[in-house]
Image (cartoon, rainbow, N blue to C red):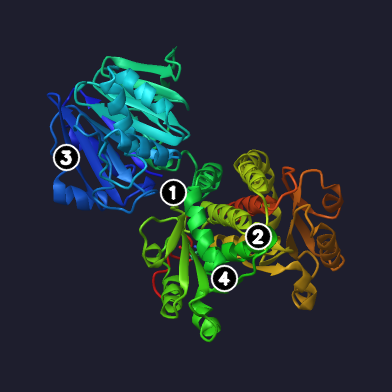
Amino acid sequence: MCGIVGVITAEGGVGDVLSKALKRLEYRGYDSVGVATVNENKLYIKKDKGKIDEVNERLNLTDVPGRTGIGHTRWATHGVPSKRNSHPHGDCKNRLAVVHNGIIENYSELKERLTRNGHIFLSDTDTEVIPHLIEEKLNSGLTGFHAVLEAVKELKGSYAIAVLIADHPDKIYVARNESPLVIGVKNKNYVFCASDIPAFLPITNQVIFLYDGEVAELSLEGVVIRNLNGEVVEREVLEVDLTPEMAKKGGFPHFMLKEIFEQPKALKNTLRIDERKLIEVCKILSESNRIVFTSAGTSFYAGLCGKYFLANISRTGSEAVISSEFDEIMKNIIDERTTVVAISQSGETSDTISAAKYAKRFGAKIISISNTVGSSLTRLADATVYTQAGPEIGVAATKTFLVQLGALSLISSKLAEFKGVITRDEYKTLLNDLNTIPEIIQLILDKTEGEVKASTEAYYNSTSILYLGRGISSAVAMEGALKLKEISYIHAEGYAAGESKHGPIALISTGFPVVFVAPMDSTHNKIIGNIMEMKSRGARIISVIEEGDEEIKSISDTVFRVPKTSDNFFKQIVYIVPLQLFAYYIAVRKGLDPDKPRNLAKAVTVA
Ligand code: AGP
């Protein structure tokens, strides 16, 4: 997730307006920043790696000429944070500049074609294909707007772009598909475009929303919106009633809830991982005689899920080891044929980095799965699979956990094909199943949030809650328990349901709440037995069930329903969503701030 912004001002000082607008979007990404302006048909670009204040200090971003400019604050998705990879990106003749938020799925083939046509690329980003595409359209004789329109038609994936063309110094061209982009207007003095309203809210709350598949031409004379067929679209100006703080949270009360609701898009973007990257990872995994997942906290529970995915889908054995225990467990058995899959959304967790360094000393290969491009762990790895959740501001991991499961599902499916366990067609079927999950999550968010919120009245005063599941749902249960304890400070424990009678059942007394993750999969019948064991001892039963599961509904005190999904390997992924909401609303009911839980840091960078 990045932040893009553009402004045309009748009042001058475009550099100051741009840098302030970018500062308000810094929560969307902050590893590099850049601006471009056009003045007397000449482009001026300043950009570098670093936070906005740092780069401003070095380059004085506010000191740029002209009245028309665009800017970008980056959260890297392709290409490590660096000056050459920072936006804006230009064409071969420095006639145009582009800033982009999103993922261009077909950038490799576009880049190959453009390179064959003589275009010179300066960065490793997917974004850079856009200015060169527009350049080709301009060279073919199309005017500014139509050159952008025709170029955008060739893009696949998600994008929100703002384009400056030197020959049109009083215009900005924008387009969007899946990535957000809003336009702000203030009589004839300002016209803005931005990823999010906070960028220009202090100047105007008059907003025009651009929809997917639309392109617009902005000038102080007005905004002209067209669809991809070139037909003009009329769109009203709306007045938004948000404070800047609320706007940063997208109107949600907390970043955590906003990020729970970002999961469909985060997963959809993550499932766009380049197949060549998956093949690179599968080569390493298939040459290993031992595969070890290692990670901490929520990422460890993702690693546990990875163990089930690898076994169930690709018939590959593996183990999951908490990174702080890695050396004690692996010291006498790790060697050059071991592959360690280190999972870390921040890529900066000290324990996980130490585990990876320890493994490298024995010649092991390292595959990292991270949400942060260029992070320390990724620089240690032989190969990295990046998740695409964008920055996660809430300390409690939500969308970054879900996209880790998405990446692990993809890797396991690809490995199954790579090993010949499944055919190419079966692999494509798995991909189709996976690609239905974002919309299932959206359905859960739309349909379940209300019932989860209402249920918290009965449970927010609990002193302890047990979370149980079987198979991969046991790992989902553990993550659900972690969510609750870290933001509501209620003790919670996630356990394999089959283990409950080997001890935890002693905890149960009348009214003790027990959460069951109970999908209609191979564990369903056994989980019913576990529920009855608890119920017969007076427990209050909270079950996350599949829509229509009347059997478990009839023996539960509270149910959170998940839409029926096709019988596939991935259905359990979505069962974490009601548990995220459950933890969130209990914390809020207790008057706590879910975004900033006590004693916790977003990245534990000390051992
Ligand atoms: C998750 O909610 C916690 N904030 C914490 O357990 C976290 O998952 C853990 O510190 C690992 O972080 P990482 O994914 O950045 O390595």
Q: Earlier in the sequence, mark 1 or mark 4?
A: 4
| The label number, if any, that marks residue 152 in the structure image | none
84 left or right of 393 in image: left
For label 2, the crowd category at 10 Å Cα-Cα, with few meaning under 14, some 14 to 19 and many 20 or more, is many
- Tell whether label 2 touches label 4 (CB within 8 Å): no
Question: Is residue 25 visible in the rendered structure shown here?
Answer: yes
Q: Position of residue 13 (x, y in %)?
A: 16, 32
- Tell whether label 2 touches label 1 (CB within 8 Å): no
Q: Which residue is mark 1?
A: 390
Q: Position of residue 92 (x, y in %)?
A: 22, 34
For label 3, the crowd category at 10 Å Cα-Cα, with few meaning under 14, some 14 to 19 and many 20 or more, is some
Q: CA distance from mark 4 to mark 2?
A: 13 Å
For label 4, the crowd category at 10 Å Cα-Cα, with few meaning under 14, some 14 to 19 and many 20 or more, is many
The amino acid type of the residue labelled 4 equals Ile
Q: Which residue is mark 4?
A: 291
Q: Residue at x 48, y 47 (%)?
A: 274
- Res 606 quadrant in image: bottom left
Of helix, strand and loop, which one carries label 3? Answer: loop
Q: CA distance from mark 3 to mark 4?
A: 51 Å
Q: Which residue is mark 3?
A: 62
Q: Residue at x 17, y 29 (%)?
A: 38
Of helix, strand and loop, which one carries label 1? Answer: loop
